[in-house]
Image (cartoon, rainbow, N blue to C red):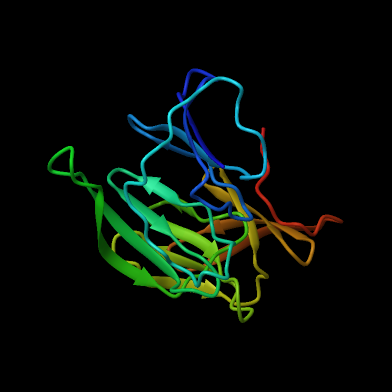
Amino acid sequence: MDIAREADERRPVWTSCQILPSVPSALLMLPGFGMRRPGRCDRPRPPQPVPECRLSMSDPIAPPSVLAMSPALVGDDSIFMTAPHGKGGRLLKLLPPRSAAEKVSSEELWTTPLDTCQGGVIHAHGRIYGSYYAGRKGWAALDAKTGAILYKNPDLIKGAALLADQRLYTLSEDGWMRLLEPTATEFKIMANSVSPRRRTTPGLIR
């Protein structure tokens, strides 16, 4: 079930069972749209009546058999999406409808082979950082304007990352936690440690 809520309230604005959940659940905040979080369609609906949403735009980026995708990255009037076993990453510019009868449309600005799954990607320093899902290709930094690959490190295993103090705190699925400083030309490894945790999902740094 998809549920949208006002940012400052707990009351649902609408619900929908049209959208299947992804493995790393996304939480998106869009101006005028509130919050969107995928859930499960087999869970009961909230007790209070809420209107159903109307699907305004859909864009398949992976085969129908693939239910996992990276949480979308939203900024300004664009959205970056990527998924494993599909088309890789795409930056789409969202185009508002010209009338109430029309739907939201999109324009593809660029594509990338980066197929991040766990933990999503991070946008900072004019770049997009993420790890490849298939092929043990490591981590990459993309130019956020063009999608060009600026640099890669194939020795880093895929995983999740958080940004704090302009550095990346990463947890790879092989158990290594690293502090990376993304420079203009490379991921500079500042610290390493081994964690017993293998499931790479985002956490919270305080």
- Given residues 163 and 34, the one toward you in this image is 34
Above or below 159: residue 40: above
Image quadrant holding the C terminus, namely top right
Q: Which residue in the rendered view is the most extreme toward the left?
A: 98
Residue found at x 39% / y 46%? 74
Compared across the picture, whether 39 is left or right of 88 comes to right
Residue 108 shows up from this direction:
yes
Compared across the picture, whether 156 is left or right of 63 comes to right
Q: How many marks?
A: 0
Compared across the picture, whether 177 is left or right of 29 comes to right
Q: Position of residue 161 (x, y in %)?
A: 61, 53
Q: Position of residue 130 (x, y in %)?
A: 53, 62
Above or below 8: residue 80: below
Q: Position of residue 195 (x, y in %)?
A: 83, 55
Residue found at x 57% / y 42%? 1
Q: Position of residue 9 (x, y in %)?
A: 50, 18
Above or below 71: residue 65: below
Residue found at x 55% / y 53%? 20
Q: Which residue in the rendered view is the most extreme toward the right?
A: 196
Residue 148 shows up from this direction:
no
Above or below 71: residue 141: below
